[in-house]
Image (cartoon, helix red, strand yellow):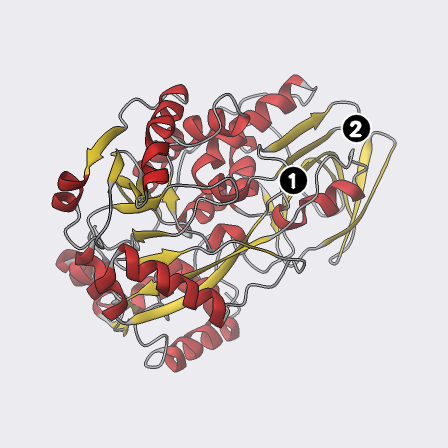
Amino acid sequence: MTAGAVADVTIVGAGVVGTAIARELSRYRLSIILADAASDVGTGTSKANTAILHTGFDAVPGSLESRLLRRGSALLLDYAARAGIPVERTGALLVAWTADQERELPSIAGKARQNGYGAIRPVPAARLYELEPHLGPGARAALEIPDESIVCPWTTPLAFATEAVRAGVRLLLDTRVTAVRTSGGEHRVSTTRGPLRTRWLVNAAGLEGDLVDAMAGGDGGFTIAPRRGELIVFDKLARPLLNSILLPVPTARSKGVLVAPTVYGNVLLGPTAQDMDDRRDTATTAGGLAFLQEAGRRIVPALLDEEVTATYAGLRAATEHRDYQIRVDRRRRYACAAGIRSTGLSASLGIAEHVVDQLGGSGLALERRADVAGPPVMPYIGQAGIRPYQDPARIAADPDYGRIVCHCERVTRGEIRDALASTVPPADADGLRRRTRVLNGRCQGFFCAARIGELLAADAGSGT
């Protein structure tokens, strides 16, 4: 579509939910804009989470979250297999450490069955220590959730955005929405890069969802109260210490501190849960990291003897409601997908399917395209599969796939070149990290940062 033209749909927010909605809408004959204030897709909650592909076993039965999470996780498993998104089915153990927690296990199992997940099963203490020999002393019992998985949180929204852009969606980054005025059957959206005109407006703005809702004349039925979660990333040498995701018995406030492997071969410990006033405060704190270390010492004591690769924090878009805040206003041609919190990655495709169905039912003309290409094949950055440096045939065809730039993560010159030339290229080193794993290893860029800077500068200078 040309600049200044009236779009059929404009989506505000290019996180995992916004990109999933854009991807779903791109399958229809529509002109679509996807706008985000950041310089890349998936830079908010989508990039800083525990990266678990949830079954939805512990969602509130009968809730919208439960339904969309169950649907979304099934869709994402299928999509990931076709798009090359790293996923590992590790299973999970929900561990009870106290008598009170042990008494909660039957009700959690009952909730899982209400949510349509019947594979959950009790695990006595003796069997628990056979499954996880490095577990700390004192565990009383557990529930096994064999279908919980780990997934790449970076490749997922990037795959959605890539598919959408290739299908004609106009991606506008560094484009913050500052005002919305509705008149004459269209929304006039003021942004930091100029005005946009659109017939339908979809709010998937995450942490700023209530602010965009107010601009669009929403009913004010929710307020975003950011909840910060700090996490510690341990070196790959810690990976043999656990075989599955180790979950705590959740509380009314939080799912608690877990220990989980990542698809990159590391081990995560976290998150904390601290309510914040600042929607941009993703700093880690001495107190938060000390709290996590204490929790980790109880769950897997040997973990604290391993090297820490990184620490980070993410903000979850919590609201005063326990359920997703998804609504479509036919009269105003406005949709809102807010309050998604920590399950947005797993539920993203289910949320997108639901929102688009609601839009269609509210008057958006949905004429399916005959030329839908399907998922792109994304560069594989997981640890379990074959990476370019391990593929002799690929290196023989193109020696750049054998030229290591980042030795910690075994990232090659060929992978960096491909990322810089991709459909949705990185704007900076952080974006390149999410596409290739450079700067993500034990040395945190001490060895490769200068070379990465040179390659980014050369790419910018070439005008590509």
Q: How many marks?
A: 2
Say few, some or many: other residues with alpha carbon within 10 Å of mark 1 (under 14 / 14 to 19 / 20 or more). Answer: few
Please name the residue shown 47% across and 23% down the image.
Answer: 61
At which x and y percent is residue 275? 60, 54
Please name the residue shown 36% across and 65% down the image.
Answer: 293
Q: Amino acid at mark 1?
A: Glu
At which x and y percent is residue 433? 41, 64
Tell me the tag on residue 229: none
Residue reaching furthest to the top: 361
Please name the residue shown 19% across and 57% down the image.
Answer: 241
Which residue is denoted by mark 1 in the rendering?
Answer: 320
Which residue is denoted by mark 2 in the rendering?
Answer: 332
Element assignment for label 2: loop
Query: Could you give the CA–CA distance between mark 2 and mark 1, rounded to whole angstroms?
Result: 25 Å
Element assignment for label 1: loop
At which x and y percent is residue 404? 25, 72
- Residue 341 shows in this picture: yes
Q: Nearer the viewer, residue 273 or 417?
A: 273
Please name the residue shown 29% across and 47% down the image.
Answer: 246
Q: Amino acid at mark 2?
A: Arg
- Select label 2 or label 1 by which is in front: 1
